[in-house]
Amino acid sequence: MSVAKKSSLELFRLRKTINSLANKEGSHTELITIYVPPDKQISDALNLLRNEYGTASNIKSNVTRKNVLDAIVKAQQKLKLFKDPGEKGIVVFTGALPQEGGGPGTERMESYVIVPPEPIRIFLYRCDSRFHTEHLQEMLREKETYGILLVDASQATIATLQGKRLEIIREMHSGVAGKTRAGGQSARRYERLRDMQLNEYFTRVGQHANDIFLPIETLKGIIVGGPGPTKYDFEKGEFLNYQLKNKIIDTVDTAYVEEQGVKEVVEKAPEIMKKVRYIEEKQIMQKFLYEVGHDSGMITYGEGEVRRLMNSAAVRMVIVSEELDLIRVTIKCSACNYQEEHTIKGKDLADFEKGLVGKPCKGCQAPSLAIVDKKDIIDDIADLAQLTNTEVEVISGETEEGQMLKNAFGGIAAFLRFKVQA
């Protein structure tokens, strides 16, 4: 599944994991990163690690040497779980990391295995004070493809932009006469002939664009541009396949039509591309608000109610705010196994845990309560959604509708499969 086709939940989880790894720091140069591409064997990576183990044995510091050797062994153990790197390859991160709030001496060995969103092309080993996640972060930005179509009355250029990779695929000249009347032709007849030439030229441009863009499975949108009004005439006509017309996300002014014009579009592209997901999110939220306004009975909101209806298999899609700072905590009594769940703010977790000390259990009154599990609220809702065959959409807080979801509806809402009796 390409990044372009991944759901908002999958992308949210992947970005969250990679960002978390990027922010981890070791006490010394003792964190291991290894990228194994699809064209390598697991044995190649194991041999590399075996050699690095020999090199690391010469590290002078006893603590650093032990931590590096342990991290290499842990990476070897993780790789041995796989017969081969698969179609996309494998990335392994291992190392002794200081625990939260602690410094040197609080390190604990941690390991992470990530299957990248797309095939990796590098065979990489690094021992550093940080994990090398930059190649994965670049993948998350790269995989959606955007079409660029620049057109004016004299020429046209068709290009694609995939991450940082810009490719100009076709340039063509129109052959359309200029607006100045030539010879002894009447102005009206001349304009008619010119309009016919322009129409034929637009048809030719549209056919080439169809041939280039339609086969691209990861095509997210098309940006139309050019220096004058001609681009609007082209866009309004029936020259592009209807599937491509529906993918036009913006029409921009450029000073040029050739390569320099394409580069102008690329400079404007980040903001244009950001609009695409915002548009998708706004559409979801506008549908939700429509149901709210019409009191249709086909939506609900608030964590408790959404959970209840998810457990009844009544929820078709749950929408959650990316900005929720909530944790789902499970506490359990070690004396009688009584347990209960709570949703608390991330900043209140430490105080909540302290409050359990000496607190009597509701089941047996023994002061034996402790946290046995804690999970980000979005991950917890997603796990429940998987059990109940429910779609999940993660909504950013960067639109008015996204802020409304967070502030007016508690950050968790849902579309229902059927009306539920109150």
Image (cartoon, helix red, strand yellow):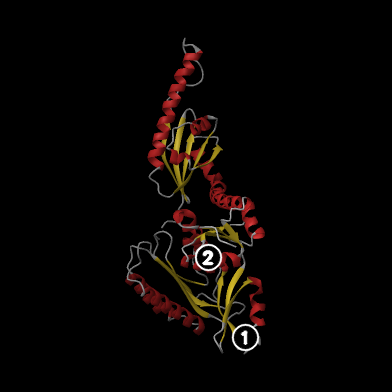
Residue 99 lies, in percent from the top left, at 57, 78
Q: Residue 192: which disc?
A: none
Q: Is residue 80 above or below residue 197?
A: below
Element type where label 2 sits in the image: helix
Q: Position of residue 70 (x, y in %)?
A: 45, 81
Say whether residue 66 is left or right of residue 324. Answer: left
Left or right: where does residue 338 sit relative to residue 73? right
Q: Amino acid at mark 1?
A: Cys
For residue 168, which quarter of the picture? top left
Q: Which residue is mark 1?
A: 361
- Please tell me which residue lies in front, 222 or 294: 294
Disc 2 marks which residue? Answer: 310
Element carrying mark 1: loop
Q: Nearer the viewer, residue 341 or 399?
A: 341
Which residue is at 48% across, 45% downward? 221
Structural crowding at the residue carrying mark 1, measured as other residues with C-alpha within 10 Å and reported as few (<14), some (14–19) or many (≥20): many
Q: Is residue 168 above or below residue 40?
A: above
- The C terminus - image quarter: bottom right
Task: Say which amino acid is labelled 2.
Answer: Met
Who comes first in sequence, dot 2 or dot 1? Answer: 2
Residue placed most toward the observer, 359 or 237 = 359
* Residue lying furthest front: 421
Please identify the quadrant where the N terminus is shown. bottom left
- Kindly tell me whether residue 131 is visible in this rendering: yes
